[in-house]
């Protein structure tokens, strides 16, 4: 399952922690994801995936500009957007540092353009 931004939800610690009810994973993830300007508690490390309707979302996902954009445009993911890649997606990539996701979205974009 891919998020709107292209990240694999099933690899996300917040998704895994919710599915396995793993409090130790929640605590480690909260510590790792917290920073000087952003605090995460173990209780917030739960997510059903940003495409879930009515499910739990990690607190960042509730305000994620990429999620709001794709959801509003009813897109499968960012690769299908006519503004791809946009500043919001670039900012998210800087935050999560996932180069593989960018490659996947670029591949999806290329295959969509060839169709």
Image: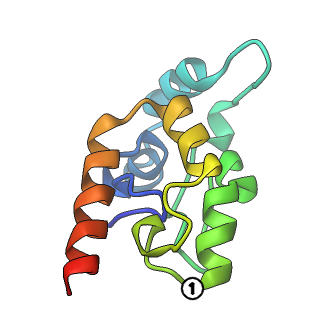
For image coordinates 72% across by 58% down, the residue present is 62
Q: Is residue 86 left or right of residue 113?
A: right
Position of residue 23 relative to residue 70, above or below, is: above
Screen quadrant of the N terminus:
bottom left
For image coordinates 76% across by 25% down, the residue present is 38
Residue reaching furthest to the front:
114
For image coordinates 48% across by 65% down, the residue present is 4
Colour style of the rendered protein structure: rainbow
Position of residue 94 relative to residue 103, above or below, is: above
Position of residue 36 relative to residue 97, above or below, is: above
Q: Where's residue 14, x and y in %?
A: 49, 45
Residue reaching furthest to the top:
36
Residue under pointer 1: 74
Q: Where's residue 45, x and y in %?
A: 58, 41
Mark 1 crowdedness (10 Å alpha carbons): few <14, some 14-19, many ≥20: few
Q: Is residue 72 left or right of residue 28?
A: right
For image coordinates 28% across by 78% down, the residue present is 113
Q: Is residue 54 left or right of residue 13?
A: right
Q: Where's residue 88, x and y in %?
A: 64, 49
Mark 1: secondary structure: loop
Of residues 70 and 81, the one drawn nearer to the viewer in this rendering: 81
What is the count of numbered marks?
1
Position of residue 27 relative to residue 74, above or below, is: above
Q: Is residue 70 left or right of residue 62?
A: left
Screen quadrant of the C terminus:
bottom left
Q: Where's residue 13, x and y in %?
A: 42, 40
């Amino acid at each position: 399952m891919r998020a709107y931004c292209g990240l694999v939800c099933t690899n996300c610690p917040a998704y895994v922690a919710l599915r396995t009810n793993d409090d130790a994973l929640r605590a480690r993830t909260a510590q790792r994801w917290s920073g000087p300007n952003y605090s995460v508690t173990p209780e917030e490390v739960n997510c059903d995936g940003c495409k879930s309707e009515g499910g739990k979302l990690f607190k960042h996902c509730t305000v994620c500009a990429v999620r709001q954009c794709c959801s509003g445009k009813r897109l499968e993911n960012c690769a299908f957007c006519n503004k791809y890649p946009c500043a919001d997606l670039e900012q998210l990539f800087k935050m999560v540092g996932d180069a593989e996701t960018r490659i996947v979205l670029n591949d999806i974009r290329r295959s969509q353009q060839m169709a």
